[in-house]
Amino acid sequence: MSDSAANSEPDHPFLSVRDIHKSYGGLKAIDGVDLDIQSGEIVALVGDNGAGKSTLIKMLCGALRPDGGELRLRGVPIEFASPKDATDSGIETVHQSLGLVDTLTVPENVFLGREETFRVFGLFRQLDRAKMRSETRGLLERFGISVPTLNEPVIKLSGGQRQTIAISRLLLSEPSLLIMDEPMAALGVDEGRRVMELVSSLRDKGIAILMISHNLEHVFQIADRVVVLKNGRLVGAKRTGDTTRESVVAMITLGTA
Ligand SMILES: Nc1ncnc2c1ncn2[C@@H]1O[C@H](COP(=O)(O)OP(=O)(O)O)[C@@H](O)[C@H]1O
Ligand SMILES: [Mg+2]
């Protein structure tokens, strides 16, 4: 545990964003946004194209430096100079591209960039395939995930299975916050439901989830809160139990809470 984590106070949100700003030239893509994400809650981030959703999550995962404002982790101010800083702080992100390599198998994808190796005769480094396979199997079991085979390249898996693998590989590092860009987009009804079940089970394990979604049906099925952006500004943040799809649509289109 780092010093800042040891000093942090448990009753603070896992992540707090205060008055964060980002401009591209003269365009204010994010213009003074506040956001709190608690451990064990699913927050949906919604808004029209160009509202600033991607810009906001890029600042939270260390891919983009804010022009101003503050990030706090469990109450402690923090700055991310790179995506590695964010992952070191327990924030993992599933981008829309998923970051999988089509030609590699499930274990090879899960361990991509952190391959398990062993030394042969104390000399050569060899990939420990058996260990990667058994750890992958354990990881998938722990999260109740089934895939038809671990031996085939992931290109042979369905969209939902690929999304699941993209999420599982990030769980290896036991993140505190998982950020997802449209995790259920482009999935069929059954597959979307399975991915939603996975995301709900991660919330139930205490992971904080921030999820961009265009699908308000999904948002109302699984999110605890919904945060609406328009033109880089926060329109409002509501508990899904305290609002309706109609009023969220009004927030997205009219920009009034
Ligand atoms: N790299 C960039 N350079 C210039 N403008 C950008 C860049 N990325 C995003 N924008 C602009 O910033 C605004 C917010 O974009 P974005 O965060 O991608 O919104 P969303 O993800 O909600 O669709 C838009 O007007 C977009 O055109
Ligand atoms: Mg976007």
Image: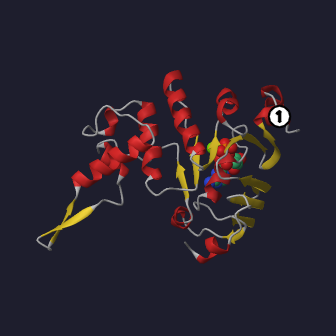
**Could you tell me residue 247's position as x and y percent?**
84, 30
Point out the quarter of the image occupied by ligand 2: top right
Nearer to us in this view, 198 or 86 = 198
Report the number of numbered marks. 1
Q: Amino acid at mark 1?
A: Asp
Task: In the displayed orientation, state which residue is furthest to the right.
Answer: 256
Q: Quadrant of the C terminus?
A: top right
The vertical placement of 206 against 122, above or below, is: above
The residue at 37%/50% (across/down) is 110
Q: Secondary structure at mark 1?
A: helix
13 displayed left or right of 200? right
244 displayed left or right of 207? right
The residue at 50%/30% (across/down) is 194
Q: Which residue position holds label 1?
A: 242
Q: Quadrant of the N terminus?
A: bottom right
**Could you tell me residue 193's position as x and y percent?**
54, 27
User: Can residue 101 be seen at all in this image of the molecule?
Assistant: no
**Could you tell me residue 8's position as x and y percent?**
68, 70
The vertical placement of 235 against 90, above or below, is: above
Check disc 1: other Cα within 10 Å, few if <14, some if 14-19, many if 20+: few
**Could you tell me residue 149's position as x and y percent?**
28, 35
38 displayed left or right of 250? left
